[in-house]
Amino acid sequence: MELIRQESDATPRPQRTRQNHRLASSIRCRECGFHSRFRSESHIHRTRRPHRRLRATAPRIRGTGWQAGIAALLVCTVLSQTALNLARPLLSYRTIALGGGGLAVGMVTAAYAVLSLVVALPLGRLADRTGRTAPVLVLGTALLVLGPVALALSPALPWVAAAAACLGFGHIVFMVGAQGYIASAAPESDLDRYFGLFTAAVSAGQMFGPLLAGMVLGTGSGAALGQTAVAALVASAVAAGAIPAGLLLLRHRKTRRTTEPRDAPGIPAMLRSRGMVPGLFISLALLGAVDLLTAYLPLIAEDRDISPAVVGVLLALRSAASILSRLGLGRMARRWPRHTLILTSAAGSAVALAVVALPVSNLPIMAAALVAGGFLLGMGQPLTMTVVVQAVPRHGRNAALALRLWANRLGQVTVPAAAGLVAGPLGAAGALWLATAVLLAAAATAGRNP
């Protein structure tokens, strides 16, 4: 079977832009007219023997195309992240209702991340080795269904911590599967675009979840906050709605491995790669700031007589701003260097969180600061994904993404635990001051590593 170039050799050599390079590299089959952008992709004739299997650069999804798989993944992401971010504020409210204070909230928030530290790297290497990321994603979704049920039934603080650990475990499993699917399914030239869409879907869940929490909890305060069981069951139902989209991915073929498999670099080798450690620390700082804001804004609002419904609106505004920044990230990256954008993201969000923590900040000032901070926080996370992916060889990208998730979870254990110690003597606002300091350190790291 002969594969020929779509453009003849007699035509002038096109200028090597990205679009022209795709055209020059595309091929078609003389026998059946099959067309592909990838020179090494194989296909099967309807009535003839298959072409010789060559190295594939993207998975072939049965019957529809890889775009349909990513669309299903985005739907699953929006629903599962909505459920997760509906349940996350409930952890704080449930802790308050059971008599816990700032220290207890910090310990529960740390429990959310501690279990996933053990599984992030093994899961990433397993997905890289087998090419089966959809079952990992479905398992994470199932855990996100069970976690809110455990929270609704929790009678004491240890049970709340166990529910938080289940939610955190489900989140890390889902993220390993989802990021691995995008890294293997999306074309190389479109990785930035699809990582941006994925993180925008995550931000959509971060917007819808707190809104639903505020709607279910209403304007209650004090003892009324103990009625979180209904809201937790709503979160479980929303997560269950994501399972059909995940099952749709199970019907697709697994990512095909190359004919020359190579082991991913080890952790020491990846950490020695240029840009890896700064990228991990900046990602840790940005995610830790989001977590502390989600966990401690309800406490700050309680001290300032702001109802849970208003807290849900504030957190939703932050998430909406993150969605806008991620959808426009491609245009911003073409205009400004990635290093400048990362530095602006870390330093600007530090200022925004400091404004929220100020005792004199009223509701309008807090809302404006959260919108600005959400825009800047959302801009940084996809950029760190690109930094981490480009720091390692192509065959080690899934392992690098898993290492990034592991580092994020490490930050979600240590930063909230430290915030709980700070919040004890300084109050809930002290946790945001700690987040401000960590973000400023991340900005300094970005400034030293252009």
Image (cartoon, rainbow, N blue to C red):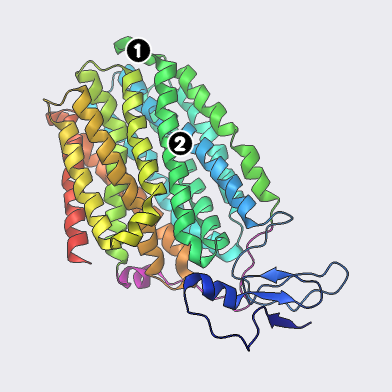
Three-letter code, disc 2: Gly
Q: Amino acid at mark 1?
A: Thr
Magenta segment range? 253-274
Residue 289 vs 253, above or below: the answer is above
Q: Residues within 10 Å of mark 2 (few under 14, many from 20)?
A: many
Q: Relative to residue 144, is residue 159 drawn left or right?
A: left
Q: Main secondary structure of the magenta part?
A: loop
From the viewer's perspective, tell me whether residue 48 is left or right of residue 431.
Answer: right
Q: Secondary structure at mark 2?
A: helix
Residue matched to label 2: 205
Query: Residue 154: image x %, image y %?
Result: 44, 23
Q: CA distance from mark 2 to mark 1?
A: 22 Å
**Going 56% across and 27% down the picture, which residue do you hit?**
237
Residue that appears at 40% across and 53% down: 405
Q: Which mark is residue 180?
A: none
Residue visible at 52% across and 42% down in the picture: 77
Residue 63 spot, x, y in % from top left:
74, 55
Which one is in front, 162 or 303? 303
**Which quarter of the rendered picture does the C terminus lie within?**
bottom left
* Residue 256, magenta (yes or no): yes
Res 98 seen here: no
90 in the magenta segment: no
Tell me the quarter of the picture where residue 5 sits.
bottom right
Specify the label residue 219 is tagged with.
Answer: 1
